[in-house]
Image (tube, rainbow, N blue to C red):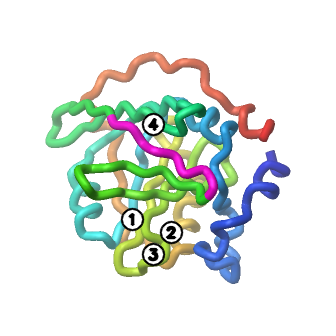
Amino acid sequence: MALHWALEALCLLPLLNPQNPVCANLVAMPITSATLDWLSRRWFFMASAFRNPEYKQEAHKIQAEFFTFESNTKEDTVLVQEHLTIGDQCLQNSTVLTVQRANGTLTKLVGSQAHVAHVLLLRDPRSFVLAFALDDKRNHGLCFYTDKPEPTPEQLEEFYQAVQCVGLTKSEILHVNWQKNKCELEKPREQKTQGMEAA
């Protein structure tokens, strides 16, 4: 696992301020087929920190959320099936993300607008971060995900360090509350933890 992190932490490091020691826990990476295989599971949205007003407003509405990633490595796409609790109601949505392997991003098209996120890995392989507009300090932000509905203290601490790394503050973090989830949680398929080691 550590070898994988070292080999792929190449092209996005300047965005993470390598002079800051708290950035050592983040890995910015190109996306490989092994990465997509590892991402293809169920994830839970835990928290976010945004300066973009539109993203912050949307994050305020979410009481709980989980989703599944289903990747297509031949077409470089990811099908996302979302289950959101908003206003004490369950809303379901599906969308397709486009994968940009070389720069490590996922793109969602909404009308003519492209929403682009970098995939950032934490030390814990059961969590990750999506980072938005890292080069724009007025609009940048992070979303934090884990493979369980409650993050561990260690996972939360890693996210707090990621927030600090990109120049955000803990006061800007919005947490969700899994106790407010209104969507049915189906039995998950087998979780993939070994695929990342093969790349």
Disc 3: which residue? 168
Circle 1 packing at 10 Å, graded few (<14), some (14-19), many (20+), is many
Mark 4 or 2, nearer chain start: 4
Tell me the CA gap for discs 4 and 3: 24 Å
In three-dimensional space, the C-alpha distance between marks 1 and 3, rounded to whole angstroms, equals 7 Å
- Residue position for label 2: 163
Whether label 1 touches label 3, CB < 8 Å: yes
Contact, mark 4 vs mark 2 (Cβ under 8 Å): no
Residue that carries the numbered disc 4 in the rendered image: 149
**Magenta segment, which residues?**
95-102
Dominant secondary-structure state across the stretch colored magenta: strand
Residue 14 vs residue 148, the one in the foreground: 14
Seen in the picture, residue 71 relative to 104 is either above or below; the reply is: above
Alpha-carbon span between mark 4 and mark 2 = 20 Å
Asked which secondary structure carries label 1, the reply is strand
Specify whether residue 13 is painted magenta.
no
Say above or below: 190 vs 73. Answer: above
> Contact (CB < 8 A) between labels 1 and 2?
yes
Q: Nearer the viewer, mark 4 or mark 2?
A: 2
Residue 184 percent coordinates (x, y): 31, 22
Say whether marks 3 and 2 touch (CB < 8 Å): yes
Q: Amino acid at mark 1?
A: Ala
Residue 101 painted magenta: yes
The residue nearer to you, when weighing 104 against 142, is: 104
Of residue 8 and residue 3, the one placed in the foreground of this image is 8
- Say which element carries label 2: helix
Quote the CA–CA distance across marks 3 and 2.
Answer: 5 Å
Element under disc 4: loop
